[in-house]
Amino acid sequence: MEDNQGILWEVFLQPKAGRPFKHVGSLHAYDKTMAMESARDLYTRRGEGNGIWIVKAEDIVASQPEDEASFFEPANDKVYRHPTFYTMPEGAKNI
Amino acid sequence: MNTDLYKYTLRLADTALILSHRLCEYTSKGPFLEEDLASMNTGLDYIGQAEALLKYAAKQNGTVDADQLAFAREEDEYANFHLVEFPNQDFGYLITRQFFMDVFSFYNFQLLKESKDETLAALAAKSLKEVTYHLKRSSEWMIRLGDGTAESHDRIQGCVNHLWMYVDEMFDEDEVNTNLLKENIATDLSEVKKKWMKKVSEVFEIATLTKPEQPKYSLVYGKDGGHTEYMGFLLTEMQFLKNRFPQDTW
Amino acid sequence: MAKELEEEDPIKLAAFQAKIDAEIKIEPKDWMPEKYRIGLIRQMSQHAHSEVIGMQPEGNWVSRAPSLRAKKILMAKIQDEGGHGLYLYCATETLGTSRDEILENLHAGKAKYASVFNYPAPTWADMGAIGWLVDGAAIVNQVSLQKTSYGPYSRAMVRICKEESFHQRQGYEIMANMAKGSAAQHKMAQDALDRWWWPSLMMFGPHDSESAHTSQSMKWKIKRETNDSLRQQFIDKTVPQAELIGLKIPDDNLKLDSETGHYSHTDIDWDEFWNVIKGYGPCNKKRLDHHKKAHAEGQWVREAAIAYAKKQELKLKTA
């Protein structure tokens, strides 16, 4: 017979309505119902959550560290995407 | 003091107390770590229910506190169901016991939250939220084990067959119940029984389990102070410090 | 065997060290030297096992807790310990091992856990001493580990530290109540302190000069402070707490050095330390057997869960 500790799931928690979901940790479970309930039992013991997402760890597509330079550095010199790039005439409000 | 109400409160309180005790004994013995934590959550919900109910009983009594009720009574003064005294023989027994209790608590609290007794109604409304979750979990486990492997099916069917003897106690109507039902305080157990049987049948069908016959086994029920052979050992352990050092606080 | 440092690519190794020196966390997919990975698996799984085995001495008393309040607290505390073990198991898995492998190593005696849990807990006062001293020592260590260089480990530590803060308080509260209780209670409390003081000091590990992994672990910031320095912090914090509740630390040479602000103390009985690590402590066999037994007894449940999940998947596919 097979024996193992189930598959790995990643848990995301929304602390309050309206807030973004944030990764809080992982757990093992054999099916998604169990994974959801274990996430509740494990990661919301102190009332930390209002919503839970779970996803199989193997289904997550992650960027590779070796792509770091080509992925993220090109954004560094595009300062015109930030509001502080622009000068406003003295006294202008709420633009 | 309304002695019927007092007895009724203690039955609810002690059943929660003894079940939480069994669940606390299970710590570090679960089939995998996640499940260990989950059953402790259930245990914590039940000890919370027990504490609130024992406080209410103590208030009615007027001469004791919740801890004295929990730890310093004679065996025949405990009024819990036999079912919850049953030891954690293995995970199958633990889940079957939990499932039977959860179905009962779910329907019982649904009715009890309409009780004329405001304290009981409020406690039932709060506990119902916890029990709704417990019932979901224990039903799913009954199904996983029933419809899992051939071995798990046989084992869980064995647990069902064995623990079925404790089921009829939950629905036994006696004077305490009928008196309080007239006052709109207690729940109608025949109503709870109908719903219990229906829910259990539904889960059993998905879980490919069968319902055993239901003869009456017990001469004296736990709710009337008669207990199984398991209870003495349980109390010896639970009351150990209170017995050994009756005057001390911790 | 892990690749020796000399066999690693020197350019990658230098970049790795530069990142660590700059306090940039290492994440699972980042390049890391084999020795870093293996060392972390060893330390993190040992840490996780300690949490999980640590449930047992307290589990020994939870069914005999003297009040509803005490019972509830202890249940929640043991549950937290299981949770902490679980966070750490999952964090360890990010290094390319599996929960199954981690548990196999525990059962085979290849992986260690904190030796302190191989000591017995014969009275209720031990629940106080474990919370106050053992958790107290663990917290000193864990606070320091929040800054460890491996991201998943550091994040788990942050979460654990947040949750642990009540553990030591509840232990100290038990000790304080018993110390001012009846003569019998006071004696139990003092005995428990006598029992747990030295094992708690041993939790920080051998002297820095004797510690096989310390210097490399410090360089890679797996560990942020040395064994001896953490041990000293613990002693300095704990001695006044004992005095406050009228208990005596079992060390006649304990003396506050007014210049350094640190307590000097008798050296640990290192023979006992190594003896327990080698497996000859009072409860080594009991604790490991307990874990193996629960694991073996749960096998049919895990198999059923696997079989059921497969059936469900099949139903989805054919539906």
Image (cartoon, coloured by chain):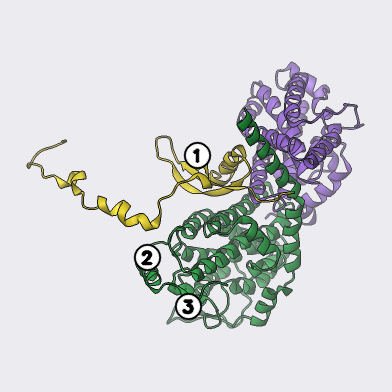
Chain colours: A yellow, B purple, C green
- Nearest the eye: B219 or B54: B219
Q: Is residue C296 above or below residue C41?
A: above
| First in residue order: circle 2 vs circle 3 | 2
Q: In which quarter of the image is the N terminus of chain B?
A: top right
Specify whether disc 1 shares its chain with disc 3.
no
Q: How far apart are marks 1 and 3 (CA)?
A: 41 Å
In the image, which disc is placed on residue A53? 1
- Nearest the eye: B72 or A76: A76
In the image, which disc is placed on residue C215? 3
Alpha-carbon neighbours of circle 3 within 10 Å: few (<14), some, or many (≥20)?
A: some
The amino acid sitting under disc 2 is Glu
Which residue is label 2 attached to? C23
Q: Is residue C201 above or below residue C165?
A: below
Q: How many labels does the image show?
A: 3
Q: Are marks 1 and 3 in contact (CB under 8 Å)?
A: no
Residue A13's spot in the image, x, y percent?
48, 42
Q: How far apart are marks 2 and 3 (CA)?
A: 17 Å
The amino acid sitting under disc 3 is Ser
Chain of the residue under label 2: C
Q: Is residue B233 visible?
A: yes
Q: In this view, does C96 lie above or below C243?
A: above
Q: Is residue C70 above or below residue B7?
A: below
